[in-house]
Image: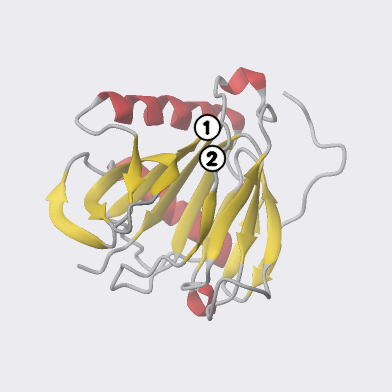
């Protein structure tokens, strides 16, 4: 596996936002890629979300746990959120903040970025809980744009996320606008067996 010439450093782009490069060991990354494939073979499928205004998201998404439709959660579950993934979320919070405070995510999104896919600036604000969002990256590198809590414009910080990276945002940054303006195709380690980018985000709905 390709090693970093200059190891990337942990950073805090904003209060409550923590980036931990290379948090997931490579074998764990491969296990997650396999799990994401299996999720798509069950009752759920990766689909492009159609927004109320008629727009279609370029990423293909699958939901785990409590089901989400734009812009609300339903009292139904299509694919169960595995206990081991919730436990991984608690471990991620402990890594980022030194504690997990009983974090109990009941929903997760798995987003697949194929050729040309991106994610516009948005807030994760459909949850009633202000518990942090845990984000795990697999596959191709991307530009993750982390903004402010007021609007989609500046100030924002561009962070490069690579496979295995952890990004957590909570506290003052919980409702910050964020997005993925660019993915770099072909930058994943070939041995990972993934063409494109997968992003797993865990959260508590508070419902």
- Whether residue 74 sits left or right of residue 49 in the image: it is left
- 69 sits left or right of 25 in the view: left
Q: Give the percent coordinates (x, y) of residue 39.
A: 31, 30
Q: Which residue is disc 2 drawn over? A: 117
Which one is nearer the viewer's eye here, 139 or 11? 139
Q: Do the residues labelled 1 and 2 touch (CB within 8 Å)?
A: yes
Q: Is residue 158 left or right of residue 204?
A: right
Residue at 28% across, 73% down: 128
* Residue found at x 36% / y 44%: 85
Disc 2 crowd rating (10 Å Cα; few below 14, some 14-19, many 20+) is some
Q: x%, y% of residue 113?
A: 51, 37
Residue 178 numbered mark, or none: none
Crowd around label 1: few <14 · some 14–19 · many ≥20 (10 Å): some
Q: Is mark 2 on a helix, strand or loop?
A: loop
Task: Give the position of the C terminus as an image quadrant.
Answer: bottom left
Disc 1 secondary structure class: loop
For disc 1, the marked residue is 114
């Amino acid at each position: 596996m390709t090693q970093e010439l200059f190891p990337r450093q942990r950073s805090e782009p904003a209060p409550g936002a923590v980036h931990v490069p290379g948090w997931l060991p490579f074998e764990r990354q491969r296990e997650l890629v396999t799990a994401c494939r299996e999720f798509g073979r069950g009752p759920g499928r990766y689909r492009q979300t159609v927004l109320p205004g008629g727009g279609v998201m370029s990423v293909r998404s699958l939901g785990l746990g409590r089901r989400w439709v734009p812009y609300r959660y339903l009292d139904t579950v299509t694919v169960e959120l595995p206990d081991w993934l919730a436990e991984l979320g608690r471990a991620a919070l402990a890594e980022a903040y030194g504690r997990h405070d009983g974090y109990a995510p009941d929903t997760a999104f798995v987003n697949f970025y194929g050729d040309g896919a991106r994610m516009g600036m948005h807030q994760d604000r459909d949850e009633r809980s202000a518990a942090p969002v845990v984000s795990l990256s697999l596959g191709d590198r991307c530009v993750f744009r982390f903004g402010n809590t007021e609007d989609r414009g500046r100030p924002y910080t561009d962070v490069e996320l690579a496979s295995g990276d952890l990004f957590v945002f909570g506290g003052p940054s919980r409702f910050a606008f964020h997005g993925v303006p660019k993915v770099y195709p072909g930058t994943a380690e070939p041995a990972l067996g993934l063409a494109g980018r997968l992003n797993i985000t865990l959260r508590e709905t508070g419902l």
